[in-house]
Amino acid sequence: MTKTVIENCKIIDGLGNASYPGTVSIAQNKIVKNESFDRAAADEIIDASGLTLMPGLIDVHCHSTFDEPSSNDELFFHRREGLAAIVAGQNVKKLLQAGVTGFVDPDGIFDVTIDLRDAIDAKIIEGPRMLCGGNALLTSVGGTAGRLIPDKGLRGYAKIVSTPEEIKTEVRRQIKNGVDWIKVHVTGLVPRQKGKGEIQAWSLEELKLVCDTAHELGVPVMGHCRNSQSIKDSVEAGMDMLLHATFMDEHALEKVVEKNIPLVPSFTFQANLADYGHRVGANEDLKEIFRKEIEESASMLKKAKTAGVPILCGSESGFSLTPYGEWHYRELEIFVSDLGFSNLDAIAAATGMCGIHAGFNGDTGVIADGKFADLILVDGDPSQDVRILKNKSNIKMVFVGGERVDLTPNRERNPISGWRVSEYSSKTLTQETSGD
């Protein structure tokens, strides 16, 4: 039995408890904590003096197959299935280099998420522990992609369903193919929309049908919700986790608290756009909209946490504003700065709470006897400042299932023909702008 001993480290257990000095052993793929051991029998002894041992981060909202598009047009019309799978297999290594040892991919293009997860499980490629959805279920309203979504069929990550029979058939098809989650795009955007958040695109009866069909086959359901009524209806329908859950009112909060539904705010995308959008040419109106989404939703999310609702970390990595391996730490930072979490509570929201509430059955995300040895060794003490995790050079070692990960950065990519959107220009060329 292969055995590794990590000694002289500070330990963060992933449950919000204070850190403490100690030793952790790894036997095969599991943690053996605080056992008496024969040093001579160990295959490897790691002196972790000055380092912190903690569970690896778990990102509960990461789109591994998108490959960082800058627009829905690029995502829906400039991707090929086989190449998307190959590229995703390389990009998930960037998550490991940032200390991410587990993630949930809610929806992906084509059926790539399922194949990627199975390739990681079979050790064909190296990546974090992964759970996945298939294609997001949308009505023809179009989710956040509006008129780019057809009235029926499949486009990008979106499967459009219109009738009860189509809903049941698609849920069953995805479960037959092996998804861990069903995702519903409960809200979306439409032209000339007024009011806060997005418009609800599903009826309560339709949402119940999704949940009932999935639950009969033992698979949980998550919903993308960006208004209060969608949150209430999703909870009543029986959903098991809500992404975003923004613009929530008191009645919606009561429903969430009553059912204790985990929430994944996924504020990293909004925060990056608000704070750094001007550096990458983002629309100024969008910057203000997304900043307000954080500001106007923070108070209700604080109340939810106080009431004991699990609040989980998800970065929505996979877009040009949230590239792989760059921003997985930031949701922790936002939880501390905007939601009033302590550093240890934020770490728990990105480790132990995710392991318990995101579909991993509590087998990862904590340092405890018998749990998977999904661990990172960090230079510094994140329990004092989670921003230590920002600098990837502070991630000294990563273990997934007890196996040491190769942290060598990916080699630089060349452009892929037709993979990115090619704009004619960023402005319209009138005679006036020509300068002639």
Image: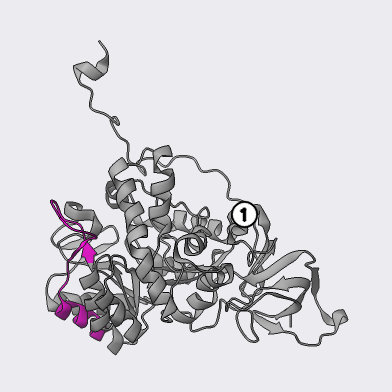
Residue 267 colored in magenta in the image:
no
**Quadrant containing the C terminus in the rendered view:** top left
Label 1 packing within 10 angstroms: few (<14), some (14-19), many (20+): some
| Residue 158, position as x, y percentages in the image | 25, 62
| Residue 20, position as x, y percentages in the image | 72, 76
**Quadrant containing the N terminus in the rendered view:** bottom right
Query: Please, what secondary structure does the residue beneath circle 1 have?
Result: helix
Residue 433: tell me if it is visible.
yes
Q: On the rendered structure, is 262 left or right of 388?
A: left
> Residue at the location (59% across, 57% down)?
387
Q: Which residues are magenta?
A: 187-212
In this rendered view, identify the residue nearer to me: 203 or 284.
284
> Residue at the location (76% across, 78% down)?
23
In this rendered view, identify the residue nearer to me: 68 or 117.
68
Q: How many marks?
A: 1
| Residue 419, position as x, y percentages in the image | 37, 44
> Residue at the location (26% across, 71% down)?
249
> Residue at the location (28% across, 44% down)?
285
Q: Label 1: which residue?
A: 392
In this rendered view, identify the residue nearer to me: 154 or 357.
357
The image shows residue 229, relative to residue 411, as above or below, that is below
The image shows residue 315, relative to residue 183, as above or below, that is above
Give amino acid for label 1. Answer: Lys
Q: On the rendered structure, is 241 left or right of 386?
A: left
